[in-house]
Amino acid sequence: GPSNIEWRDAYKPDAIGQPLAKYPGRRPKTVQKVIEDAKGFYERIVKQRHENLSANHYGTSSFDPWNVVMYWWWYFPASFVCPHDIQRVGPLADGGKWICGMSLYEEKPRSKCVLYSFGVNRETRFEGEMLDRTDCEIWAYDASVDKMGPETDGRPHVQFKPYFIGLTDHVDAQGHTWKTLRTLMKENGHDWIDILKVDIEGSEYDTFAAIMDDFPDVLPFSQLQLELHVHESHVSFPNFLNFWERLESKGVYPWWTEINLNPVFSGQRPWASEYCFINTRGGKKNLLIQNYE
């Protein structure tokens, strides 16, 4: 019958199957449509998370977030989408990042592209490559070092301040300056950040509690590169779950993850993982949610 037509085509080397245009799922979609579809897929994952939490007795003393059959990171898959090209920027090893829409930043005029980096330490190969390939301005903060690494130190378009980011603006007992993201953006005259990169060794939960309080409707960044630390000294599972679901409630979803296996080499659990998130809100300020013309 007619259903055999595709098979007959497939045997001819010059006509494999039907042209892709014949399959509705393959038609080019707008960026907005890709995002809307992804929200539908993502709801299924959230439902599965809650089913798994119940099945593993979450909320009772028998819940073990490091149960080998269903451990911590498996409740939080990076199952959203980046609706653009994805490129690895910086080193292949620790410190490199997966950037959503890198080609868009390479095309942008500098006045429009802003990158904030918290917890730079001296590992600045990612920031160095961003400076080499784009006209982004980089605002970097870390009170544990007095300057950035050699890839960025002293280059134009980079501002470095020895501050920590956190829950409130204060100076701690060691004399370190802490500031909230809202305060820093106000000082710098910014209302939007294109790429927010955060690796602050467990302080991320306080930091994001402040960010989500200070920006109740729309978080002020297009994408977030975040290393999450879940050692018991950093966060409890219920607090982590609350942090994660609060981010989701703001329309910020994970599309890539990379578990940091360094702790495993010394016989520990894999208590750190890199995640990439996209913000699905922000209107015209958010480059990543604009349709291609």
Image: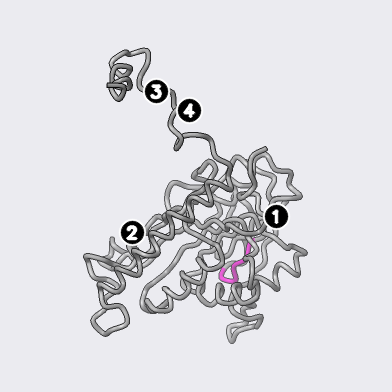
Determine the residue positioned at 61% across, 77% down.
213
Magenta region: 140-144
Q: Nearer the viewer, mark 3 or mark 1?
A: 3
Q: How far apart are marks 4 and 1 (CA)?
A: 33 Å
Q: What SS does tag 2 mark?
A: loop
- Coloration mode: one colour
Other residues around mark 4 within 10 Å, as few (<14) / some (14–19) / many (≥20)? few
Outermost residue toward the bottom in this view: 173
Give whichever of discs 4 and 1 has the lower sequence position: 4
Nearer to me, 41 or 106: 41
Place residue 73 in its image quadrant. Answer: bottom left
Q: Nearer the viewer, residue 156 or 37?
A: 37
Q: Which amino acid does label 4 sit on?
A: Ala
In terms of image quadrants, where is residue 143? bottom right
Quadrant where the C terminus is found in the figure: top right
Real-space Cα distance between discs 3 and 4?
Answer: 8 Å
Amino acid marked by disc 1: Lys
- Residue 285's label in the rendered image is 1
Of the numbered discs 2 and 3, the one sitting upstream in the chain is: 3
Inspect the image, locate mark 2, and give the three-letter code of the amino acid beneath it: Leu
Marks 2 and 3 sit apart, C-alpha to C-alpha, by: 44 Å
Residue 125 percent location from the top left of the image: 54, 50
Q: Are marks 2 and 1 in contact (CB under 8 Å)?
A: no
Q: Are there few (<14), some (14-19), or many (20+) residues within 10 Å of tag 3?
A: few
For disc 3, the marked residue is 18
Q: Mark 2 points at which residue?
A: 261
Determine whether, in the image, residue 17 is placed left or right of residue 252. left
Whether residue 15 is visible, yes or no, is yes
Counting residues from the start of the chain, the first of labels 2 and 4 encountered is 4
Q: Where is residue 44 in the image (x, y as percent from the top left)?
A: 39, 59
